[in-house]
C-alpha cells in the first residue's frame, strides 16, 4: 500500500535500499506513491506537529477520486472531512488555512448537491505546504 491505499510493491526493501531510494526522489509526487517513503515523510511531519496536513491531503485526494454511490454518501464524507480538519461544527481549527478558504468550503457545504471538487482549492494550498516540508525531508 502507498499513502493513498492502493497496492504498491510487495518487495521488502533493506534499510540500505530504503536510504538510497529516499535520495533518488526529486519530486513531491514521487514520495506519495511509495509506502516506506510516505511513512518516513509522515514521521517527519509528526515530529514537526504538522501531520494533519498529510492526512488532509490524502483524505481529500481520495474524496476527489472516489465514485460515491449517491449524494448522501458524498455529503457524509464531506462533513467528516470538514469536521475533522476545518473545525466546521466546532471552534477548533486543525489546518493552517485562511479563514476565507474555510468560509468558502462552509458555503459550498450548503449547496445541494455538494460538488465533488469542494476541497480542491484547500487541498492545493495544503499541497504547497507539504511541498515545502518535502524540501526539508529531502535534505535530511
Image (cartoon, grey):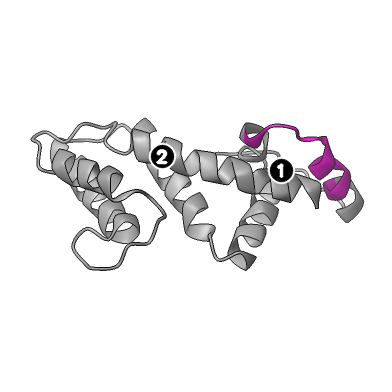
Q: In this view, does 27 lie to the left or right of 56?
A: right
Between 65 and 118, the one lying in front of the other is 118
* Residue 130 lies in the magenta-colored region: no
Judging from the image, what secondary structure is the residue with disc 2 in? helix
Residue positioned 91% across, 51% down in the render: 16
Q: Rounded to the nearest whole Å, what is the CA distance between mark 1 and mark 2?
A: 29 Å
Report the side of 11 relative to 63 (left or right).
Answer: right
Above-or-below relation of 115 to 97: above
| Left or right: where 65 falls relative to 89 | right
Q: Give the range drawn in magenta.
A: 18-28
| Residue contact between numbered discs 1 and 2, judged by CB atoms under 8 Å | no
Quadrant of the rendering where the N terminus is positioned: top right
Counting residues from the start of the chain, the first of labels 1 and 2 encountered is: 1
Q: Rate crowding at label 1 as few (under 14), some (14 to 19) or many (20 or more) other CA atoms within 10 Å.
A: few
In the image, residue 24 above or below residue 41: above
Report x, y in % for residue 76: 20, 50
Left/right placement of residue 137 relative to residue 88 reads right
Residue 4 visible in the displayed image: no
What residue do we see at 66% from left, 59% from top? 44
Q: Is residue 109 visible?
A: yes
Q: Which residue is drawn at 61% across and 56% down?
A: 42
Residue carrying label 1: 10
Query: Which residue has dot 2 on it?
Result: 123
Amino acid at each position: 500500500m502507498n499513502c493513498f491505499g492502493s497496492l504498491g510493491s510487495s518487495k521488502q526493501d533493506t534499510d540500505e535500499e530504503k536510504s538510497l531510494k529516499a535520495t533518488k526522489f526529486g519530486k513531491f509526487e514521487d514520495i506519495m506513491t511509495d509506502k516506506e517513503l510516505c511513512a518516513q515523510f509522515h514521521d517527519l511531519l509528526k515530529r514537526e506537529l504538522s501531520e494533519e496536513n498529510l492526512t488532509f491531503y490524502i483524505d481529500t485526494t481520495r474524496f476527489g477520486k472516489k465514485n460515491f454511490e449517491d449524494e448522501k454518501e458524498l455529503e457524509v464524507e464531506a462533513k467528516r472531512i470538514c469536521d475533522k480538519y476545518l473545525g466546521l461544527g466546532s471552534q477548533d481549527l486543525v489546518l493552517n488555512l485562511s479563514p476565507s478558504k474555510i468560509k468558502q468550503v462552509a458555503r459550498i457545504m450548503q449547496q445541494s448537491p455538494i460538488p465533488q471538487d469542494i476541497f480542491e482549492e484547500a487541498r492545493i494550498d495544503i499541497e504547497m505546504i507539504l511541498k515545502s516540508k518535502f524540501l526539508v525531508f529531502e535534505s535530511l
